[in-house]
Image (cartoon, rainbow, N blue to C red):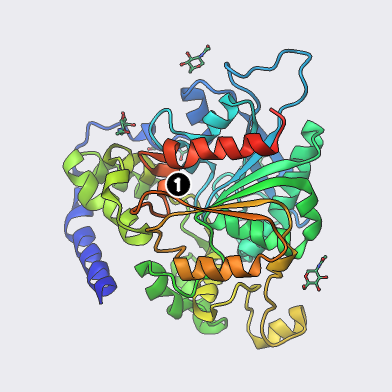
């Protein structure tokens, strides 16, 4: 009931107030907020390399690397720096790690601490709309869920970074869907456990039956049955291609314009964050809300959302459900197989927020009960309202997330 009221309220505020605000004359320069990840690094005085990683199924991923900083620049003789890979959540991109206010941006803190930082971009976001022979203007390009990011993108990036740096192992940090991808890869392709010295899972998503987030809980039942009706709905929302939540300039402009006046920042621009991820007024800095919406969404495929909807509906952490006919062909069974989480063996640290309405206590319990093959450390952030996005955007992200992460990494790397 609460959820329903919230959704109606949101719809009303948006139609009545936000949309007419398009014509509101704002002193804010829109160009400030939609900078690319490398433009943000340049603004902040950090070196950033762009790499292109081609997966075994042909996707060309844009990857950004901060090899060192002015405080951690290597002396010519020193050994290579330990590698950390950061992976964003659903429909986000590498830039989401750089929108918190200055001094709280994890990639820079890691680079200053002596790490070689690699920022992933999952297939389909604005930096990874490229393929050896498919075009993002056409449907076949968008036939993927997060399963493909796990089976193709993350291993390709890991191997590429190891190859470039000559290191034997990497550390991995994922938030939300970034953790989902890691759990999928490390369970179904256990050889990757040998290449990870520690994985840190922020706000992890696997089992999802108890998600309380209204958009997830309300929308999941609508879209998950594979077949023509789902495809028709999907086509309607995705211009017939399957691309979903792309980075659209007019949408960003709208949010930026609407969020710029401080009085609106809380009412319109923070509210969607709270409704989706958990209410935590005290950790969200209203001054960054237009920056958030200038960097979200960044593009994904509708099937990624459908796969998460399947997690919610089935209560299982299983492979993509294509419907019985196709499942029989692909998986040799009517329903898709579970990911064998017991195969995960690389050291794992889970950090969860007590007020995260996407990663809820019951679902975390299901996840942890399946992680039988791993020495796992579980940390509940010691702040009762900490939500799903506070890991990246929280005012106290340094105290509760970033500094503890550096401490954990230092325990598993020679720095
Ligand atoms: C940022 O917005 C401007 C127009 O407001 C547009 O021309 C530019 O391409 C955008 N940049 C990105 C990276 O989206
Ligand atoms: C490193 O660069 C940052 C950002 O440009 C600057 O604020 C800082 O003073 C520099 N530190 C050193 C030691 O040069
Ligand atoms: C909020 O964000 C602004 C803009 O980045 C920053 O100047 C300010 O210090 C932040 N406030 C807090 C409490 O972190
Ligand atoms: C696509 O990949 C090619 C080859 O790696 C690269 O030169 C090009 O810049 C990429 N295009 C985009 C839009 O990322
Ligand atoms: C993964 O787990 C399954 C089920 O426990 C097991 O049968 C399989 O051999 C494991 N795979 C590998 C590569 O260890």
Task: Say if residue 38 shows up in the picture.
Answer: no
Q: Tell which of 113 and 174 is nearer to you.
A: 113
Residue at 20% in and 39% down: 262
Task: Identify whether 327 is placed above or below 201.
Answer: below
Q: Tell which of 187 and 405 is nearer to you.
A: 405
In the rendered structure, the answer to whether residue 209 lies left or right of residue 118 reads left
Disc 1 target residue = 391
Residue 357 image-quadrant placement: bottom left
Task: Work out which quarter of the rendered image holds the N terminus and state it.
Answer: bottom left
Where's residue 159, x and y in %? 78, 44
Where's residue 191, x and y in %? 81, 56
Task: Identify whether 310 is placed above or below 278.
Answer: below
In the rendered structure, the answer to whether residue 186 lies left or right of residue 41 reads right
Query: Which quadrant does ligand 4 occupy?
Result: top right
Residue at 55% in and 40% down: 405
Task: Work out which quarter of the rendered image holds the C terminus and state it.
Answer: top right
Task: Identify whether 346 is placed above or below 206.
Answer: above
Where's residue 282, x and y in %? 27, 45
Residue 337 image-quadrant placement: bottom right
Question: How many numbered marks does the figure carry?
Answer: 1
**SS at mark 1 in the image:** helix
Residue at 53% in and 29% down: 108
Task: Say if residue 304 shows up in the picture.
Answer: yes
Where's residue 340, x and y in %? 71, 70
- Specify whether tag 1 is near ligand 3 (CB below 8 Å): no
In the rendered structure, the answer to whether residue 354 lies left or right of residue 152 reads left
Q: Tell which of 393 and 120 is nearer to you.
A: 393
Residue at 40% in and 57% down: 354
Dot 1: within a 10 Å radius of its alpha carbon, few (fewer than 14), some, or many (20 or more) residues?
many
């Amino acid at each position: 009931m609460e959820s329903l009221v919230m959704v109606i309220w949101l719809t009303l505020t948006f139609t009545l107030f936000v949309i007419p605000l398009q014509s509101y004359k704002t002193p804010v320069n829109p160009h400030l907020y939609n900078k690319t990840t490398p433009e943000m690094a340049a603004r902040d005085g950090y070196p950033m390399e762009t790499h292109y990683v081609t997966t075994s199924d042909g996707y060309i991923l844009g990857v950004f690397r901060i090899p060192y900083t002015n405080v951690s620049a290597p002396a010519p003789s020193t050994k290579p720096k330990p590698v950390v890979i950061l992976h964003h959540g659903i429909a986000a991109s590498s830039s989401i790690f750089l929108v918190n206010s200055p001094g709280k941006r994890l990639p820079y803190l890691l680079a200053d601490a002596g790490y070689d930082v690699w920022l992933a971009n999952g297939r389909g976001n604005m930096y990874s709309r490229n393929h050896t022979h498919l075009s993002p203007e056409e449907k076949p390009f968008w036939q993927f869920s997060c399963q493909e990011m796990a089976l193709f993108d993350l291993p390709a990036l890991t191997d590429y970074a190891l190859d470039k740096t000559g290191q034997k192992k990497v550390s991995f940090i994922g938030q939300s869907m970034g953790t989902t991808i890691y759990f999928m890869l490390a369970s179904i392709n256990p050889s990757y456990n040998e290449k990870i010295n520690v994985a840190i899972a922020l706000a992890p998503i696997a089992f999802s039956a108890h998600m309380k987030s209204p958009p997830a809980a309300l929308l999941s039942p609508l879209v998950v049955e594979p077949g023509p009706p789902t495809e028709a709905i999907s086509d309607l929302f995705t211009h017939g291609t399957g691309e979903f939540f792309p980075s659209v300039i007019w949408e960003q402009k709208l949010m930026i314009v609407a969020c710029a006046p401080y009085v609106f920042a809380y009412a319109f621009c923070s509210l969607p964050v709270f409704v989706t991820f958990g209410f935590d007024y005290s950790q969200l800095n209203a001054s960054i809300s237009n920056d958030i919406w200038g960097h979200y969404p960044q593009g994904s495929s509708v099937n990624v959302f459908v796969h998460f909807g399947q997690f919610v509906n089935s209560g299982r952490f299983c492979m993509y459900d294509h419907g019985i006919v196709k499942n029989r062909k692909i998986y040799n069974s009517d329903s898709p197989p579970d990911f064998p989480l017991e195969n995960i063996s690389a050291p794992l640290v889970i950090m969860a927020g007590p007020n995260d309405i996407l990663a809820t206590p019951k679902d975390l319990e299901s996840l942890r009960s399946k992680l039988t093959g791993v020495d796992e450390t579980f940390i509940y952030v010691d702040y009762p309202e900490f939500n799903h996005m506070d890991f990246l955007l929280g005012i106290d992200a340094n105290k509760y997330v970033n500094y503890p992460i550096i401490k954990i990494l230092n325990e598993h790397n020679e720095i």
